[in-house]
Amino acid sequence: MGLSGEHDVGKLGRVVVWDPAPTGDPVLDAALRVIATHQDSKPSTLIRLLGKDLRHALYARLASGGVLHVGQGRILGLFPAHRWPAQDSGHEAEVRQQLIQALVQESTPSERTAALIALLHALRCEHKIINPGDYGLSRRQLRSRAEQIADGNWASEAVRTAIREMTAAVAAAANFVAAVSARASSSG
């Protein structure tokens, strides 16, 4: 799977499935079926489709793997809510160490770590995961290193595009609500 290039059929930068063979992982196989069905779509379209009902499945998988445990609670003492606190902080520490190695020590990240860095870079929150001051870096230096890694990751542009589109949609909805509210208050 990847993005179409200049020599591929269809529009440039669309998602293409080159090997539709099942992976053996139920969550990934379901995602592959969705992607194969919507081939030649924009990455942002697929991200929205893939995100439907995915959170609970992934939380349940993490709980069955011992990373999280399921908790029940209440919001404001009234509304039932699920909580998924970490059962073992070892996994988080390991991921954070991989991020430090890639972003601070400038070692070559794994594909998984590079994808995570691309997501953090697209969200502009590298500094929230790694405090650059702890390593004698500025936020700009940390961001620059994240950008270098993100630029080498095929998914990074797709993630940035999807986030930009979602942000624009939220802003448009907020503007619409503000305009309707202003019109209603001036009419009344």
Image: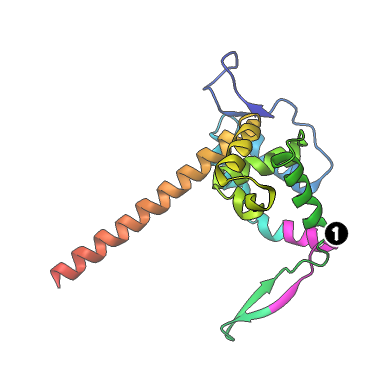
Viewer-proximal residue, 170 or 149? 149
Q: Residues within 10 Å of mark 1 (few under 14, many from 20)?
A: few
* Identity of the residue furthest to the left in this view: 187
Counting from the top left corner in percent of width and height, residue 108 is at 76, 33
> Tell me, what colour scheme is on the image?
rainbow
Residue in the picture at 28% in, 61% down? 178
In the drawing, does residue 103 fall left or right of residue 25?
left
Counting from the top left corner in percent of width and height, residue 71 is at 74, 75
| 68 within the magenta span | yes
Residue 66 sits in which quadrant? bottom right
Residue in the picture at 76% in, 71% down? 70
Position of residue 164 relative to residue 108, above or below, is below
In magenta, the rendered stretch is 58-72
Counting from the top left corner in percent of width and height, residue 116 is at 68, 44
Residue in the picture at 69% in, 41% down? 103
Viewer-proximal residue, 56 or 134? 134
Position of residue 110 relative to residue 131, above or below, is above
Query: Which quarter of the rendering shows the C terminus?
Result: bottom left
Query: Which quarter of the rendering shows the N terminus?
Result: top right
| 176 within the magenta span | no
Residue that badge 1 annotates: 65
Position of residue 85 relative to residue 73, above or below, is above
Viewer-proximal residue, 98 or 48? 98
Counting from the top left corner in percent of width and height, residue 98 is at 78, 45
* Residue 41 seen in this snapshot: yes
* Residue 37 seen in this snapshot: no
In the drawing, does residue 69 fall left or right of residue 3?
right
Viewer-proximal residue, 88 or 74? 88
Which secondary structure, mark 1? loop
